Image (tube, helix red, strand yellow):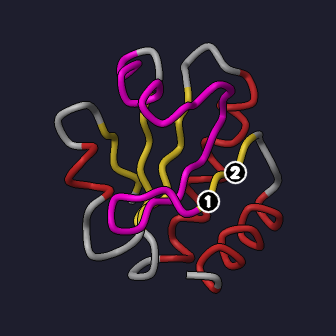
């Protein structure tokens, strides 16, 4: 399950026991719309290992700015509240899974 985060819930989500990958996106962004369903589908493969969340950059500009999100879609992996990796741009399911596996194995 992918949770929607805002300014109120963001800090708690990225400081949890399980690392979290956050999809920074916007409604008007074509590549974001392409990545959205892939992100949702891939989330099932990492249950218990990685939490999945989304932040709408138009609704939470403060969070996007704080983390230096300049282009979307931008996926940031957080562990213990700190950024450990960043994936920018849309990609097919297999590529996203491989990248996430690589990030998890390096933690």
Q: Percent from the top left, x then y, of residue 90?
A: 77, 42
- On screen, residue 27 versus residue 15, left or right, reads right
Label 1: which secondary element: strand
- Other-residue count near label 1 (Cα within 10 Å), few / some / many at <14 / 14–19 / ≥20: some
Residue for point 52% across, 76% down: 46
- On screen, residue 100 versus residue 79, left or right, reads right
Q: Name the residue under label 2.
A: 87
Q: Mark 1 points at which residue?
A: 85
Q: How far apart are marks 2 and 1 (CA)?
A: 7 Å
Label 2: which secondary element: strand
- Other-residue count near label 2 (Cα within 10 Å), few / some / many at <14 / 14–19 / ≥20: some
Residue for point 27% across, 61% down: 15
Q: Percent from the top left, x then y, of residue 107?
A: 55, 81
Q: Nearer the viewer, residue 48 or 44?
A: 48
Q: Percent from the top left, x then y, of residue 60?
A: 36, 22
Segment colored magenta:
59-84
Q: In which quarter of the image is the N terminus?
A: bottom left
Q: Which of marks 2 and 1 is in front?
A: 1
């Amino acid at each position: 399950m992918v949770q929607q985060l805002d300014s109120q819930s963001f800090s708690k989500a990225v400081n949890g026991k399980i690392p979290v990958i956050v999809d920074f996106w916007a409604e008007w962004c074509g590549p974001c719309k392409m990545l959205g369903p892939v992100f949702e589908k891939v989330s099932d493969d990492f249950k218990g290992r990685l939490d999945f969340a989304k932040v709408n950059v138009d609704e939470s500009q403060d969070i996007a700015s704080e983390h230096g999100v300049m282009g979307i879609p931008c996926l940031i992996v957080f562990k213990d509240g700190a950024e450990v990796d960043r994936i920018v741009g849309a990609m097919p399911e297999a590529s996203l899974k491989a990248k996430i596996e690589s990030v998890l194995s390096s933690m």
